[in-house]
């Protein structure tokens, strides 16, 4: 994959990520079964699902009013109770986004739906609420890899959430539409809070325990999970969190968000869309202008949450340090070579601003120069991958862990070092590789590797233990101590997993005072 291929394109399209990383998730995992007698009556209404792989499945369950018409760019409106039986046998449309590949998947502004995989029996069972990634502009709550049957067969209720993306969920419309649209860059996060309220009020009807909810996510989903740890409104809605390749810095200031909106407005005017009214224009036209802005913006990931408003007064990592996540449990980590997916396995200098997620180019180049002293025998292209990985994923995850343990929060940290055994990413522990292990859905090639299969079973089991409220553990893994500021114990997940205290301490020290 040439370096010129946009990393945003990879992140926002889960199908593209799957193809790029070698995932081969058979579509038959989501084959629609004939409706059966799986009918559940919850406070909000009655739902007819299906039974797949011995698990009750409810697809396309609405959790908010459709954010269309007068509700475009507005905070989500909680769903009213309804009569009759809702057909929950088919997935709803995914959120509006660029169609990087023709997957045949329907996209719509009317996207605020969730999916449930529930074990047989009354429960109560622990609940795992999953937030997909995709760079805040792409992804799907029903990508094949997120089939929750494996977790459900182990006694976990799985809920996968959809939320508005890009211009619809992460752009500040106040400069363009007036004060009543203030803080609209956080509407995507508000969608997820509304979904968590739905889960809290209704999941018991599906066998879930509303007092034992774990929120998890990967990439942008993990970063939004950090925001949920920071927001007071969501504090009572979950008790544990899982962050895979996340962090708590990926937000815009009010000034930055205003600049994004003004740039969008200028491009919108040039495009001469009919009608020009943002509230009436076709959704696809808004996406087209969004993509033009992404391709021309000096700001990496211009669509993201915003601080300085009512929902997020400051960065999530700072709010966590101030105690917002007190009392919750946290499992988090990153992959050793995350950025190899975007830079390529053998990148050539120099690093570009578009390669970075949190810091400016000068800051990162200053740190990169010191990598040669820490890793004198490492090839320069691998040092570049490690530095960019640290800037976007590893160090932000460490900062969230540090902030959480300051308030005596139970924290377990990992790093995935298992490297791909073939293909373009051979030798790299790349971004999104963790998903195949956590969900126990390896690529066809990795399923031929007994060590990969063993690690997938271990990680899947350890995640289940954490969701159940236990210490993450599995047969074959060493005992997993909690992370603290003294020992910094980290589980290194590999062919032979091990515990390291203050993993890569010399490299971590390079980022002191920088991030």
Image (tube, grey):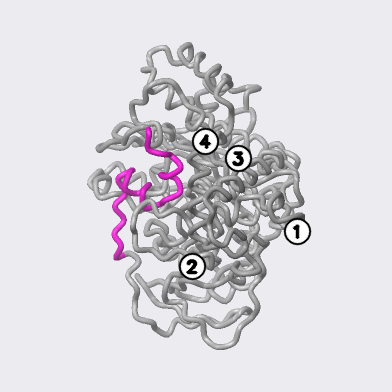
Say left or right for 31 vs 175: left
Q: Quadrant of residue 358?
A: top right
- Of mark 4 and mark 2, the one earlier in the sequence is 2
Cα–Cα span, label 4 and label 2? 28 Å
Residue at image coords 50%, 46%:
135
- Of mark 1 and mark 4, the one earlier in the sequence is 1
Say left or right for 339 vs 404: left
**Residue holding disc 4:** 393
User: Number of numbered discs present?
Assistant: 4
Quadrant location of the N terminus? top left
- Mark 1 lies on a secondary structure that is helix
Q: Quadrant of residue 77?
A: bottom right
Stretch of the chain drawn in magenta: 4-28
Within-10-Å neighbours for mark 4: few <14, some 14–19, many 20+: many
**Residue holding disc 1:** 180
**Residue holding disc 3:** 250
Q: Foreground mark, 1 or 4? A: 1
- Mark 3 lies on a secondary structure that is loop
Within-10-Å neighbours for mark 3: few <14, some 14–19, many 20+: many
**Residue holding disc 2:** 115
The answer to the question of whether label 2 and label 1 lie on touching residues, with beta carbons closer than 8 A, is no
């Amino acid at each position: 994959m040439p370096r010129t291929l946009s990393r945003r394109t990879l992140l926002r399209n889960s199908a593209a990520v799957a193809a790029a990383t070698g995932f081969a998730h058979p579509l038959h995992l989501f084959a629609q079964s004939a409706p059966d007698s799986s009918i559940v009556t919850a406070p909000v209404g009655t739902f007819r699902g299906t039974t797949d792989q011995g698990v009750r499945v409810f697809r396309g369950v609405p959790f908010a009013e459709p954010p269309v018409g007068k509700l475009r760019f507005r905070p989500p409106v909680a769903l009213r109770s309804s009569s009759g039986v809702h057909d929950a046998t088919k997935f709803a449309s995914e959120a509006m986004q660029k169609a990087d590949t023709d997957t045949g998947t329907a996209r719509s502004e009317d996207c605020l739906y969730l999916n449930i995989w529930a074990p047989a029996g009354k429960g109560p069972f622990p609940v795992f609420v999953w937030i997909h990634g995709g760079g805040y502009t792409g992804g799907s709550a029903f990508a094949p890899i997120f089939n929750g049957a494996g977790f459900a067969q182990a006694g976990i209720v799985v809920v996968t959430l959809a939320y508005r993306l890009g211009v619809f969920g992460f752009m500040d419309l106040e400069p363009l539409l007036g004060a009543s649209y203030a803080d609209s860059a956080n509407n995507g996060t508000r969608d997820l809070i509304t979904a968590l309220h739905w889960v809290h009020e209704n999941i018991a009807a599906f066998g879930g325990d509303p007092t034992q909810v774990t929120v998890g996510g990967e990439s942008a989903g993990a970063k939004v999970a950090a925001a949920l740890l920071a927001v007071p409104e969501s504090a009572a809605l979950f008790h544990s969190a899982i962050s895979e390749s996340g962090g708590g810095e990926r937000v815009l200031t009010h000034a930055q968000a205003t600049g994004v909106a003004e740039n969008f407005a200028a491009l919108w005017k040039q495009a001469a869309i009919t009608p020009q009214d943002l509230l009436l224009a076709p959704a696809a036209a808004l996406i087209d202008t969004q993509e033009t802005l992404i391709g021309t913006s000096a700001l990496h990931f211009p669509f993201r949450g915003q601080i300085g408003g009512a929902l997020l007064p400051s960065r999530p990592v700072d709010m966590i340090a101030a105690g917002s996540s007190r009392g919750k449990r946290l499992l988090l980590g990153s992959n050793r070579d995350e950025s190899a997916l975007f830079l390529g396995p053998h990148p050539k200098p120099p690093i570009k601003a578009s390669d970075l997620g949190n810091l400016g180019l000068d800051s990162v180049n200053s740190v990169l120069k010191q990598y040669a002293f820490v890793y004198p025998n490492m090839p320069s292209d691998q040092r570049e991958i490690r530095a960019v990985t640290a800037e976007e994923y590893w160090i932000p995850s460490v900062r969230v862990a540090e902030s959480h343990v300051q308030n005596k929060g139970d924290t377990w940290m990992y790093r995935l070092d298992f490297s791909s055994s073939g293909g373009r990413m051979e030798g790299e522990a790349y971004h999104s590789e963790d998903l195949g292990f956590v969900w126990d859905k390896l690529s066809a090639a990795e399923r031929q590797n007994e060590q990969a299969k063993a690690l997938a079973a271990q990680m899947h089991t350890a995640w289940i233990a954490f969701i159940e409220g236990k210490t993450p553990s599995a047969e074959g893994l060493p005992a997993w101590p909690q992370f603290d500021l003294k020992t910094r114990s980290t589980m290194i997940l590999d062919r032979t997993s091990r515990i390291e205290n203050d993993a890569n301490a010399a490299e971590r020290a390079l980022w002191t005072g920088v991030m």
